[in-house]
Amino acid sequence: MALYNPPLQVIQLIATSAADAERGPAVWMRSEEAYLRLLQDGELVWVQTPRRKELARLIVDDSIRRGTVVLRDIVGAGPSEIVTVTKPDLDNPPRRDLA
């Protein structure tokens, strides 16, 4: 069963330094967007950018506009790019197609 997962636009990128108290990959989105994707505040999610896929912590924030996200320390993301955010499938092992 496929989930409804509309793409999201990056409205802000945050890059941290080693001296910052809060650092590491994170994504902020509205609670309605998280609900559509069956995501909860604080859980790990996949952030798929045009160049790569990376795990990040989800932070639910209703001050973020609908259809947009804020990313922190996500390599390969750029402002105004379109990304998708999905729940990782931790119940099934990675699929390996052997030909």
Image: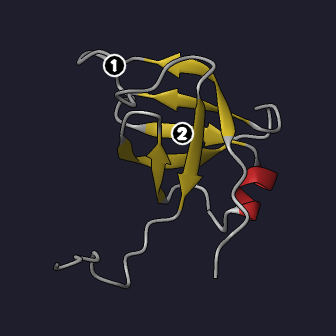
Residue, disc 2: 27
Who's the residue at 45% across and 26% down the image?
77
> Left of 63 or right of it: where is 13?
left
| In the image: residue 63, left or right of residue 43 | right
Position of residue 6 relative to residue 70, above or below, is below
When asked about the image quadrant of residue 62, the answer is top right
Amino acid on which the number 2 mark rests in the picture: Val
N-term-proximal mark, 2 vs 1: 1
- Residue drawn at x 57%, y 16% as measured from the top left: 79
Q: Which mark is residue 29?
A: none
Q: Position of residue 61 (x, y in %)?
A: 71, 40
Residue matched to label 1: 20
Q: Could you tell me which secondary element the residue under label 1 belongs to?
A: loop
Residue 33 percent coordinates (x, y): 75, 51
Please state the horizontal and vertical placement of residue 52, each as a whole percent of the image.
36, 39
On screen, residue 24 above or below 57: above
Q: Specify the quadrant of the image occupied by residue 80.
A: top right
Q: Residue at 48% of width from left, 19% of height from top? A: 14
Spatial CA span between label 2 and label 1: 17 Å
Q: Residue furthest left?
A: 98
Q: Residue furthest front?
A: 99
Q: Using the image, determine if residue 15 lies above or below residue 60.
A: above
Pair 2/1: label in front: 2
Specify the amino acid type for callout 1. Answer: Asp
